Amino acid sequence: MDMLDGYLTAWLAYLVAALILCFVGWKISARWSWRRVKMFLRMLMIVVLFTPINISSNGAWFAPAYLVGGYEWLLGNTELSTQAFFNLTVALAVGISLLLLNAVVKKLTHLNES
């Protein structure tokens, strides 16, 4: 039970820190005039900070994919690092798809207003 409490406490601390970092990044990028670049970098920040990976083969123990991928790559464990970078790539593809969908919807609604 102690291990589970420590695990949940660590995740809570990480999520609070990641949310604060997202808030700060959002505020910093709010004044940027390049809307597409701003939206892409915001999406990239969210994908990198909030994409998890299961690090245990016999249970559901998750960790941030970029941390696991980088650490395991440095140690030479290519299986887990490849899985982490695959998770990040899939999340990035979903994020780019949502950005493209958002652009199409805005374009279509703008055409209907004219």
Image: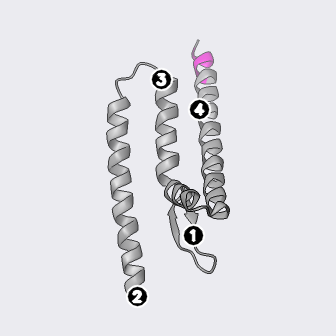
- Mark 1 = which residue? 55
Q: Which numbered disc, 3 or 1, marks the residue closer to the eye?
A: 1
Question: In 3D space, how far apart are the residues under numbered discs 2 and 1 (Cα atoms)?
Answer: 19 Å
Mark 2 or mark 4: which comes first in sequence? 2
Residue found 64% across the figure and 27% down from its top = 104
- Label 3 sits on a secondary structure element that is helix
What segment is highlighted magenta in the picture? 109-113
Assess whether residue 110 is covered by the magenta stretch.
yes
Mark 3 or mark 2: which comes first in sequence? 2
- Mark 4 = which residue? 102
Choose top left, top right, bottom left or bottom right for residue 103: top right
Identified by mark 4, the residue type is Asn
Q: Are marks 2 and 1 in contact (CB under 8 Å)?
A: no
Q: Are marks 2 and 4 in contact (CB under 8 Å)?
A: no
- Label 4 sits on a secondary structure element that is helix
Across and down, in percent, residue 3 comes to 41, 83
Identified by mark 3, the residue type is Arg
- Label 1 sits on a secondary structure element that is loop
- Mark 3 = which residue? 35
Q: Residues within 10 Å of mark 1 (few under 14, many from 20)?
A: some
In front here: 6 or 26?
6
**Position of residue 40 in the picture relative to residue 30 (left or right):** right
Identified by mark 2, the residue type is Met
- Mark 2 = which residue? 1
